[in-house]
Image (tube, rainbow, N blue to C red):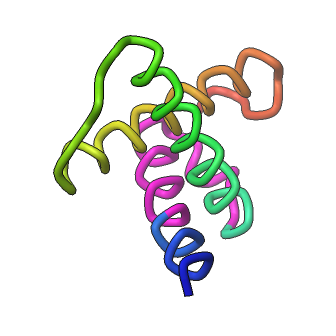
Amino acid sequence: MGWIVTLIIGGVVGWLASILMKTNAQMGLVANVLVGVVGSMLGFWIAGILGMSPTGGILRFLVAIGGAVLLIFALRKFGVFRKA
């Protein structure tokens, strides 16, 4: 059950990040889920390095979206996504 929730929340996070970065038209469902899950892990890893421990649902959600936005930014620099 935990994996299903992770995939659903990852999809929402990836979708919101793709809207913020204007790559929504280039990404499908699978890309949104992958970017959301991997970007969330990246965001929490960076938050840990910075000594932050996000608690509460909204702050954790914002860190996850921030990590996904950072991942899309990096993927855009590598040429995976083009700027809209």
Q: Which of these two is toward me, 55 or 76?
A: 55
Is 84 one of the magenta-colored residues?
no
**Would you say 30 lies left or right of 11 here?**
right
Q: Which of these two is toward me, 71 or 28?
A: 71
Q: Residue at x 29, y 31 (%)?
A: 53
Position above or below: 54 against 18:
above
**Would you say 12 lies left or right of 79 here?**
left
x, y percentage for residue 2?
54, 78
Is 24 one of the magenta-colored residues?
yes
Magenta extent: 10-28
Quarter in which the C terminus is drawn? top right
What secondary structure is the stretch in magenta mostly built from? helix
Position above or below: 33 against 59:
below
x, y percentage for residue 30?
73, 66
Position above or below: 15 against 30:
above
Quarter in which the N terminus is drawn? bottom right
**Would you say 78 lies left or right of 62 here?**
right
**Would you say 67 lies left or right of 23 here?**
left
Q: Residue at x 50, y 78 (%)?
A: 5
Q: Residue at x 29, y 41 (%)?
A: 62
